[in-house]
Image (cartoon, helix red, strand yellow):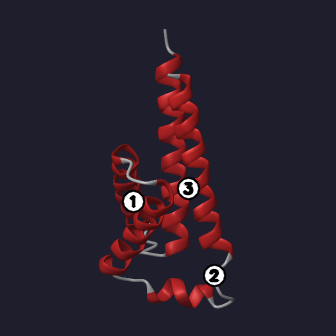
Amino acid sequence: MIIKINIKQIILKKLFLLFLIFGFITPANSEQLDKNIITKVDVESFWNQIKKTRKIKYGVDKKWEKNMDYCSYFAENIALSKGEGFVMSKLVKYANKCHHTLNLMTQYLLEEK
């Protein structure tokens, strides 16, 4: 049980690194790049690319994919409800917070007696 939690934590940390890489390796005109990503199709392509990259690196993990689907949906809804639109830097920020919260909830429930 503890080993599964540690593996999940490692995976989530690596996902966070992936989000950081996308954030810091963007070109100097990243604001323009964010402005160009305005459609749901562009956003879906982005999330699918993250899933494909992770699948290549770590293999298939259906639980992670479900969490990713949930967190991407959550991130999009939060961004739209705040009136920010589909700005990638915001979507990544909200999805990362979602993954972190899911991880904390899982730890809490597993430690609960």
**Among the 4 quarters of the image, the one containing residue 18:** bottom right
**For the residue carrying disc 1, how many other residues have a C-alpha within 10 Å: few (<14), some (14-19), or many (20+)?**
many
Q: Earlier in the sequence, mark 3 or mark 2?
A: 3
| Residue at the extreme left of the image, as rendered | 41
Q: Nearer the viewer, mark 1 or mark 3?
A: 3
**For the residue carrying disc 3, how many other residues have a C-alpha within 10 Å: few (<14), some (14-19), or many (20+)?**
some
Q: Position of residue 45 (x, y in %)?
A: 36, 76
* Residue placed under numbered mark 1 in the picture: 72
Amino acid carrying label 2: it is: Thr
* Residue placed under numbered mark 3 in the picture: 15
Query: Horizontal placement of 49 versus 29: left or right?
Result: left
Using the image as rendered, state which of residue 19 and residue 79 is in the foreground. Answer: 19
Say if 42 sits above or below 78 in the image: below
Q: Position of residue 14 (x, y in %)?
A: 60, 53
Q: Earlier in the sequence, mark 2 or mark 1?
A: 2
C-alpha gap between disc 2 and disc 1: 20 Å
**Among the 4 quarters of the image, the one containing residue 28:** bottom right
Amino acid carrying label 1: it is: Ser
Amino acid carrying label 3: it is: Leu
The structure residue drawn at horizontal position 55% and vertical position 55%, both measured from the top left corner, is: 15
C-alpha gap between disc 3 and disc 2: 17 Å
Q: Position of residue 100 (x, y in %)?
A: 55, 44
* Residue placed under numbered mark 2 in the picture: 26
Say if 48 sits above or below 39 in the image: above
**Label 1–label 3 contact, CB within 8 A:** no
Q: Secondary structure at mark 2?
A: loop
**Label 3–label 2 contact, CB within 8 A:** no
**For the residue carrying disc 2, how many other residues have a C-alpha within 10 Å: few (<14), some (14-19), or many (20+)?**
few
Q: Secondary structure at mark 1?
A: helix
Q: Secondary structure at mark 3?
A: helix
C-alpha gap between disc 1 and disc 3: 13 Å
The structure residue drawn at horizontal position 48% and vertical position 49%, both measured from the top left corner, is: 98
